[in-house]
Amino acid sequence: MEISGDRPKKEITYCVTGGSGYIGSWLVKSLLEKGYKVHATTRDPEKASKVLSFGNDHGGRLKVFKADMIEPGSYDAAVEGCDGVFHVAAHMEFGVYSRQNPDSYLKSDVHKLATAGTLNVLEACLKAKTVKRVVMTSSVSIITARDVGGKLKSTVVDESCLNSIDSILRARAHGWVYAASKIIADQTALKFVNEKGLDLVSIIPSTVGGPFLTPTVPASLQVLLSPFTGDRGLYPIITAVNSRLGCIPIVHIEDICDAHIFLMEEREAKGRYICSAHSCDLHQLTDFCNQQYSLPVKHKLSDEPEGWTPTTLSSERLKKLGFQFKHGMKKILKDTVDCSAELGLLSSTPPN
């Protein structure tokens, strides 16, 4: 697979689905700054125009398309003529259907987004005939350090440590709907490309932090900072991640976007790649933020259970391919705290 070859970047066009979201908007920005042409999709182009206003400074190389994941054929126009597609769009409403049973979820719009939505994007890529590779944004939700009984499988968690939809639906831990949708999207995409022969690489981001272009604080940052905001809806999600993985893995928004582009262009890329710059457990995270930024913890942290073993989410597969991270824990958390504080997140009153 050779996308660029000897062609100048200004002749290469990439499509970014979910172009007005946290990762999507920063990825659009990164691609434009590198000289590529970009087709960005969004459900609401008018609102997206404010998030993507930086595109006006790049010589008309950005085009915004309206697309809805559950509408058949919705992505055809945006993908037409593109050399590659970054499928970033996803449903980030953690609480929807969370208190209902699995049958309710399987009939929900969230489930449709995970199945029909994924297929709509991939089918558009096949129709276009110009798309050489799809880089799909997965989630750390598809990874686990523990078996069904809760026993630790490994202290080094890699791409082989896959979570199962059965485990998600059985446990129904906080945020289970989002986790289920990402697992189903991953399985749906894998089945499709195995049958159709489309070149697809999957990137598994850990919790993304850093600056943002969106008008509100992104969901991943709100989860990461929930120990300090007192958000009783999001705090159980970060504790569930800590329990399932044995750590809180984090990555800077610049690194995750650079990794997307790296995997699009690297001809040897194949399969799934974890993208995580640093792993720390919940106590280490809160201690660091308290010491560095004087952030008081607004939730009582429970002691780790007897026999608790910290783990590391491994990005060795990505690094062996040649990718290098630019930002470590201190930079990730500093940018997260600074940018979130500007919008008043850390001074807000905890929700009832």
Image: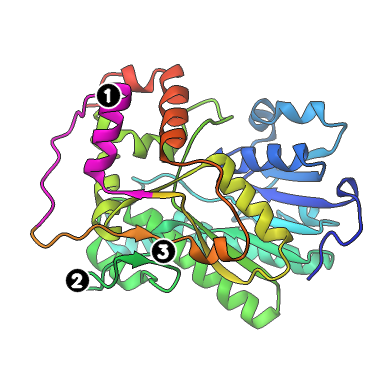
Measuring from the top left, give residue 156's x and y in whole percent: 35, 66
Q: Which residue is mark 1?
A: 295
Please give the residue where the numbered disc 3 appears in the rendered image: 142
Residue occupying image coordinates x 17% and y 33%: 299
State the CA–CA distance, disc 2 to disc 3.
Answer: 17 Å
Q: Compared with residue 67, is residue 171 higher up or lower down, i.e. above or below?
A: below
Instruction: Choose between 334 and 193: the one closer to the eye.
Output: 334
Q: CA distance from mark 1 to mark 2?
A: 33 Å
As shown in the figure, which amino acid type bears the numbered disc 1? Leu
Q: Residue furthest bottom?
A: 195
Look at discs 2 and 3 and give the one toward the viewer: 2
Mark 3 packing: few (<14 Cα in 10 Å), some, or many (20+)? many
Q: Earlier in the sequence, mark 2 or mark 3?
A: 3
Q: Which residues are magenta?
A: 279-305
Q: Is residue 195 left or right of residue 304?
A: right
Q: Which residue is mark 2?
A: 151
* Residue in front for this viewpoint, 199 or 316: 316
